Image: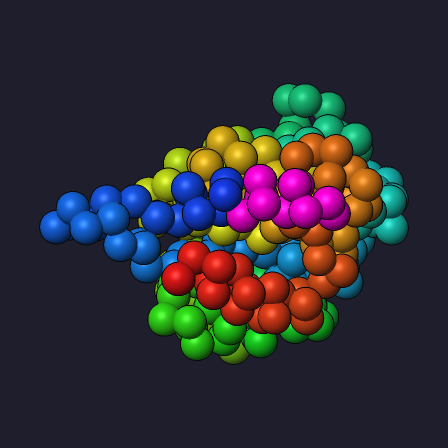
Amino acid sequence: MSSETAEHTAAQATARTTGPAAGGTGAALPLTVGFDLDMTLIDSRPGIRAAYLELSAQTGTYIDADAAVTRLGPPLDEELAHWFPEERIPEMADRYRALYPTHAIDPTPAMPGAREAIEAVRALGGSAIVVTAKHEPNARLHLDHLGLRPDVLVGWLWAEAKADALRAHGASVYVGDHVGDVRGARKAGALSVGVPTGPCSEEELRAAGADVVLPDLRALPEWLRAHAASLA
């Protein structure tokens, strides 16, 4: 990154994370960092694969579960459209969500660095929120099972729709693995931090407008400390 680009990114970050305080002093706002869930905080591929295989077995409809888990990010209905006619998608979505707690929670691990990433936000006096396209009750089951404790969880929001929740909770940074997460962050006016740990490559995340791309969440604490220091 050139020095000119770095200065521009830092200026954008400062504009997004500072503003007039209640007393009009212009002090920095409290740090709130948003996280996507699937393939950002959790590796949901084993669990989602198991849930699709069970749905396939119960309905007698072929589902290529291995292909499905390469496309994680968009809403469930988009994946089900590969396997079921349009008129059956609402029914199958409900059935999948009902199967999910039994088949998808136990096999799903945290992504490397997930706990440390949340702790890094807290260590800076900030709040960590999760904004995900996943059915919120099932997202909560994952977080509880893995002992991940964000301050806020908001589900059923995809891509640009995530911006409403990010703005509502004052998130100045949003971390995600998908180009849809980049679009949501940009619409919210938040700094977009991409991690190519899901279906989207570093090049795709940058092309979508990610401000920063890290190799994975293990790199986030160091980056976040430097980011916070630049705003002090």
Q: Nearer the viewer, residue 131 or 219?
A: 219
Residue 22: x and y in percent read 15, 49
- Asked whether 96 falls inside the magenta stretch, the response is no
Residue 181: x and y in percent read 60, 41
The residue depicted at 25 percent of the width and 48 percent of the height is 26
Quadrant of res 105: bottom right
Residue 49 lies left or right of residue 132; in this view the side is right
209 above or below 134? Answer: above
Instruction: Answer yes or no: is residue 124 visible.
Output: yes
The residue depicted at 61 percent of the width and 70 percent of the height is 222
The residue depicted at 63 percent of the width and 47 percent of the height is 6
**Total residue callouts:** 0
Residue 3 lies left or right of residue 12; in this view the side is right
- Asked whether 9 falls inside the magenta stretch, the response is yes
172 above or below 188? Answer: below
Residue 70: x and y in percent read 82, 47
Q: Nearer the viewer, residue 132 or 7?
A: 7
Residue 64 lies left or right of residue 194; in this view the side is right
Residue 183 lies left or right of residue 122; in this view the side is right
The residue depicted at 73 percent of the width and 24 percent of the height is 85
**Which residues, given as a range, are shown in magenta?**
1-10
Q: Nearer the viewer, residue 158 or 139?
A: 158
Task: Give the prevailing secondary structure in the magenta stretch.
Answer: helix
Q: Nearer the viewer, residue 151 or 5?
A: 5
Colour scheme shown: rainbow
Residue with the most extreme front position:
3
Quadrant of res 108: bottom right
Residue 77: x and y in percent read 64, 33
34 above or below 79? Answer: below
Instruction: Answer yes or no: is residue 105 visible.
Output: no
Quadrant of res 99: bottom right
State which quarter of the image contains the C terminus.
Answer: bottom left
